[in-house]
Image (cartoon, rainbow, N blue to C red):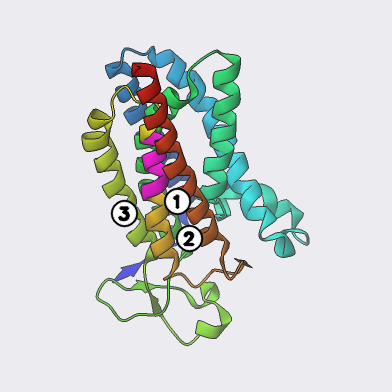
Amino acid sequence: MFKSPGPIALEVGPIIIFWYGIIIALAFLAGLAVTVKIAKKQGENPDKILNLAIFLLLGAIIGARLYFVLFNWGFYKFHLQEIFMTWHGGLSIHGAIIGGFITGAVYTKLNKLPLLKYADFVSPGLILGQAIGRWGNFFNSEAFGFPTDLPWKLYIPIENRPPEYLNYQYFHPTFLYESIWNFTVFLLLFFVFRKKFEGKNGSLFFIYLILYSLGRFIVEGFRVDNIYIILGMPIAKLMSIIFIIIGILGLYFVKYYTKCARQ
C-alpha cells in the first residue's frame, strides 16, 4: 500500500519546501545528465546542451502551466493568484512537450542548430525526467485512478477525493503505472533505439512520442480526473492519439528523407 507523507518536505519558519518542487528539480537534473552524456558521445559541445536546457526548462514549465490553467479556467478565473503557484501541482506533460518543442524549435533556428538531432539528444532524458516527475503526483495525492483493493493500492486523503468517491479510501496509483512505463521507454530509447537509429535524426524523438503516448493512453483509462471530454474522449487521450499520429508520420518522413539522401 502507498500513502503520501504529504506535500511539504521541510518547513522552517516562513520557509516551506514542497516535495513537488524537489521531485521536479531531480527530474530535470537527471534528464539533463542523460542528455549531456548522449550529446558528448556524438561529439557535440555540452555547453550548447546546457544553454538549450535552460530555455527548454522555461518553455516546458510555461507550456505545462498554461495548458493546465486553460483546461481548468473555471477554477483559476476566481483564483488568479493560484496560476503562479506551480508547487501546488498542476503541470500538464502534454503542455510541457508542446512548450518545450516550440522553444527548442525557436532556439535551434536562431542558433542554426539541427532541430531533430537535438530533439533526439533530449528525448531519452525527457522520458526519464517524466518517470521521476510522476512521483510529484504521489506526494500531492493527485492524478490517481479508480478505487481498488489491490496490494499496491494508494491511500487518498478525503479532501483529495472526487465527490462521488468520498466513501472510498484506496485507489489505483496511476502515477506509479505511468512512472514504470516511462522508465521502460527510457531504457528502450537509451539502450536499444539510440544505437539502432543512429544517424537518422528525429527517429528517437518520434519513437518517444509514440511510446510515451501509447502508455499514457492506456493509463488514462484508469484515472478518475478526466474532466474535459472532446470528441467523446478525455483530452489527454485525444492528445495522445495526436502525438502517436505525429510520431508515425515523423518516422515515415525520417525514413523517406534518409532514403532520398542515399540516392
Q: Is residue 187 above or below residue 73?
A: above
Identify which residue is drawn at 45% across, 65% down.
Answer: 220
**Which stretch did the figure color magenta?**
204-211
Q: Amino acid at mark 3?
A: Trp
Q: Amino acid at mark 1?
A: Trp
Identify which residue is drawn at 55% across, 77% down.
Answer: 162
Quadrant of the drawing holding the N terminus:
bottom left
User: Of circles 1 and 3, which is in front?
Assistant: 3
Q: Is residue 161 above or below residue 42?
A: below
Q: Give coordinates of residue 31: x percent, y percent.
A: 37, 35
Residue picked out by circle 2: 140
Per the model, the C-alpha gap separating discs 2 and 3 is 20 Å
Q: Mark 2 near mark 3, Cβ–Cβ under 8 Å?
A: no
Q: Give coordinates of residue 69: x percent, y percent.
A: 67, 54
Q: Is residue 119 visible?
A: yes
Residue picked out by circle 3: 181
Residue picked out by circle 1: 19
Per the model, the C-alpha gap separating discs 1 and 3 is 22 Å
> Which element is circle 2 on?
helix
Q: Mark 1 near mark 2, Cβ–Cβ under 8 Å?
A: yes
Q: Magenta stretch mostly in which secondary structure?
A: helix
